[in-house]
Image (cartoon, grey):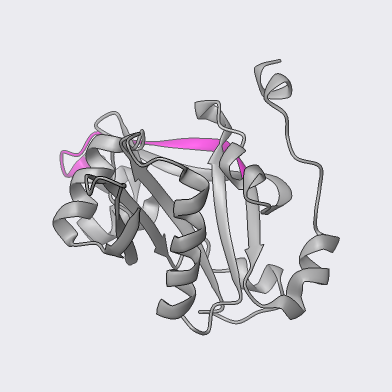
Amino acid sequence: MRLEKASAKAIKYACMNFHYAKSIPVNTFGYSVFNQINEWCGVVLFGSGANNNLPKMFGLNSGEVIELVRMALNGKQGVTGSIMAVALKLARKHVPLAKIIVSYADSNQGHIGTIYQATNWIYTGSCKLDALEIDGIQIHRKSVYSKYGYNSVERLNRNGVNAKWIKGEVKHRYIYPLDKSLIPMCKALSKPYPKKQAVEA
């Protein structure tokens, strides 16, 4: 298994074919994943994240918190936890100022963050994130703004784009401290891991 810097072409293909969101996050960097027999298996992507105020939650500054935004893989990658561990090390080198990595599991897709639990991320609870749906595909409003220059539903519809708000998406938030001095603070935010049965109920 190896990871190397992902090309724009690899990112686009993996996001559109291997991930349920069928969208390409903006302002990201990431790594192509190759398995033991050198098959390309998809990408792991990081970015600045959807919430500009997220660093304030941890008493940090902009650039000190990054988000794991996609694990778009085709299932041939082998042990996903090992891939994540390598990707986290590479991300730390790519963004040396980063002190915490955040990621979300979408409960609307039946996800509870099993991979984060298996790799000892800290669960901080659920939150609600708004999104836009464009032509039936859910896209974050930052991505919409990047493509159209605005993200007003009314303006999008006036210009022939079939858009609507999807409000109150519930996602489980996990954090991973890169700076060891922040481990006590992160653990203080910790909550019990959600269970699959609770989601199904």
Report which quarter residue 184 is drawn in.
bottom right
- Of 116 and 22, which appears nearest the observer? 116
Location of residue 141 in the rendering, given as x and y in whole percent from the top left corner: 38, 52
Q: Magenta stretch?
A: 158-172
Note whether residue 121 is visible: yes
Location of residue 37 in the rendering, given as x and y in whole percent from the top left corner: 25, 45
Q: Is residue 27 left or right of residue 66?
A: left
Q: Is residue 190 above or below residue 96?
A: above
- Of 158 and 119, which appears nearest the observer? 119
Residue ID at (44%, 53%):
83
Residue ID at (44%, 79%):
93
Instruction: Pick out the residue farthest to the front.
Output: 37
Report which quarter residue 190 is drawn in.
bottom right
Location of residue 74 in the rendering, given as x and y in whole percent from the top left corner: 30, 36
Note whether residue 50 is visible: no
Instruction: Pick out the residue farthest to the top.
Output: 201
Q: Is residue 2 left or right of residue 128?
A: left
Q: Is residue 116 above or below residue 200?
A: below
Residue ID at (34%, 64%):
28
Q: Main SS of the magenta segment?
A: strand
Residue ID at (48%, 57%):
68
Q: Is residue 200 left or right of residue 44?
A: right
Image label count: 0
Look at the image and say whether residue 161 sits in the magenta stretch. Answer: yes
Look at the image and say whether residue 60 sits in the magenta stretch. Answer: no
- Of 107 and 196, which appears nearest the observer? 196
Location of residue 155 in the rendering, given as x and y in whole percent from the top left corner: 27, 48
Classify the position of the C terminus by image quarter.
top right
